[in-house]
Image (cartoon, grey):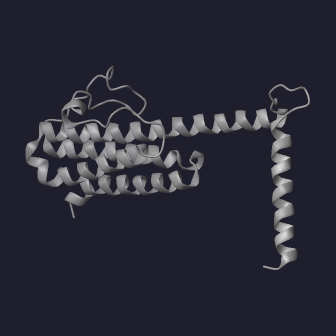
Amino acid sequence: MTTTGRRAVLVAGASAAAAALTGCTSDAGGPRRPSAAERAAAREAERVARAEAALRRRAVSASRTLLERYDATLAAHPALHARVAPLRTSAAAHAKALGEGGPAPSATPTPSATATAPGAGAGASTATATPRPVPASPEAALRELGAAARTASDAHTAELLAAPPEYARLLASVAAAGAAHAYLLTEGARA
């Protein structure tokens, strides 16, 4: 670097420091008030953060509701374990992934805790939800579980346009996996 280049860097640095110091004080000696544009930007950022937090809660809720259905089905039909357990493991990973990076949702449900509210809707609280019984027939239970997987997949797909790009990609992936689960639980048995 030449001497002229060094001097330019030093002058620019000194100017930036002086501007920063000037910006930290006000003529009145009191704290600096944010401008109307800064307040509007802060309100908009807060609105966006609240909307994203609500979207994440809905996505996690839809995935946990599906996970509860898996648990209830496995509890009612242990003979389906080999077919359903791998899909349940995948659904649990999806619920966890959808909840990461956002506001901390309630603790990840455990099989014993989730079996108490297998029929909770996507927006319902598991504490107040009335459990929906699992069909007595294993075939009917698989069809019902496939329908629950399709419902969760549709819920994730519906949120895509409102989601920030990175989360939208995750939602799309989970929605596609849910559609595959629905197929494997219903049509896949016939193939």
In this picture, residue 190 sits left or right of residue 8 = left
Residue 123 location (% of width, % of height) = 43, 30
Q: Residue extending furthest front?
A: 3
Q: How many marks?
A: 0
Q: Residue at x 56, y 47 (%)?
A: 163
In this picture, residue 171 sits left or right of residue 119 = right
Residue 136 location (% of width, % of height) = 13, 36
In which quadrant of the rendered view does residue 152 lie? Answer: top left
Q: Quadrant of the N terminus?
A: bottom right
Q: Residue extending furthest left?
A: 79
Foreground: 31 or 52?
Answer: 31
Q: Is 81 rendered above or below residue 5?
A: above
Residue 108 location (% of width, % of height) = 31, 37
Q: Is 119 rendered above or below residue 66?
A: above
Q: Residue extending furthest top?
A: 128
Q: Residue extending furthest bottom?
A: 2
Residue 142 location (% of width, % of height) = 21, 46
Q: Is 155 rendered above or below residue 1?
A: above
Q: Residue at x 33, y 46 (%)?
A: 149
In which quadrant of the rendered view does residue 78 lie? Answer: top left
In which quadrant of the rendered view does residue 43 lie? Answer: top right
In this picture, residue 126 sits left or right of residue 34 = left
Foreground: 148 or 47?
Answer: 47
Foreground: 57 or 119?
Answer: 57
Q: Quadrant of the C terminus?
A: bottom left
In this picture, residue 158 sits left or right of residue 141 = right
Q: Residue at x 32, y 44 (%)?
A: 147
Q: Residue at x 14, y 44 (%)?
A: 138
